[in-house]
Image (cartoon, coloured by chain):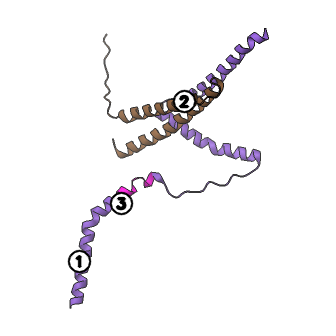
Chain colours: A purple, B brown
């Protein structure tokens, strides 16, 4: 009697676990549109530091502090293009300035 | 679309991609352990599913600016 029911119970447990995981993913908005996804990411980011702190207190050791990186790829993404185009746009005036300075220097030396 | 709007759309797109790939990976691992005797194919399937969902969402988000919306009056 028990031998016959056991496979059914096992299968039912497996279905419950898998279905529960799927339901949790669906319910927390992980499978929705773009906006819900970024909202969920924000929530996860906000929830991680307190959770890490709690775990550290529980285990009683300190994690090394995360190093601060000054470089931000978000701001530096276009910097190459911006700098080169800016240099190109001010090139005529820079060249004329240098030419004038050069002519002045030459005049002063020829006097 | 203005540049700010495009930037915001890209941010949403990448965040969504990370979430969906992670979710797909997680669910793939769960299903692989529970149903498929720890084979790797469900994990790859789940990750691919997540990537596909993210790609589709991004595509719809970028296209939504150009899609025409109309209000059709219902016939009485």
Q: Chain of mark 1?
A: A
**What residue lies at 35% left-to-right and 33% top-to-bottom?**
B63
Q: Nearer the viewer, mark 1 or mark 2?
A: 2
Disc 1 to disc 3, how far (Cα)? 25 Å
Disc 2 to disc 3, how far (Cα)? 43 Å
Magenta part of the protein: which range?
A74-81
Mark 3 crowd level (few <14, some 14–19, many ≥20, 10 Å Cα): few
Q: Height in image: A83 above or below A100?
A: above
Q: Identify residue for label 3.
A: A83
**What residue lies at 23% left-to-right and 76% top-to-bottom?**
A99
Q: Identify residue for label 1.
A: A100
Tell me, yes or no, whether the two marked residues, 1 and 2, touch with CB atoms within 8 Å: no
Residue A101, horizontal then vertical, whole percent: 26, 79
Q: Height in image: B31 above or below A11?
A: below
Q: Residue furthest top?
A: A1
Element marked by disc 2: helix
């Amino acid at each position: 009697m028990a031998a016959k029911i056991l496979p059914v119970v096992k299968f039912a447990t497996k279905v419950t676990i898998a279905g529960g995981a799927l339901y949790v993913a669906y319910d927390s908005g992980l499978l929705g549109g773009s906006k819900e996804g970024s909202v969920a990411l924000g929530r996860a980011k906000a929830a991680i530091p307190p959770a890490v702190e709690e775990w550290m207190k529980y285990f009683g050791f300190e994690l090394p502090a995360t190093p601060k990186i000054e470089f931000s790829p978000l701001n530096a993404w276009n910097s190459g293009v911006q700098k080169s185009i800016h240099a190109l746009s001010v090139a005529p005036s820079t060249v004329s300035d240098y030419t004038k300075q050069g002519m002045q220097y030459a005049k002063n030396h020829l006097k | 679309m203005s540049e700010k709007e495009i930037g915001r759309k890209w941010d949403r797109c990448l965040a969504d991609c990370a979430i969906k790939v992670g979710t797909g990976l997680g669910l793939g691992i769960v299903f692989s352990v529970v149903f498929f005797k720890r084979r790797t194919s469900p994990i790859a399937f789940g990750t691919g599913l997540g990537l596909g969902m993210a790609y589709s969402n991004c595509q719809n988000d970028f296209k939504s600016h150009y899609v025409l919306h109309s209000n059709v009056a219902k016939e009485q």
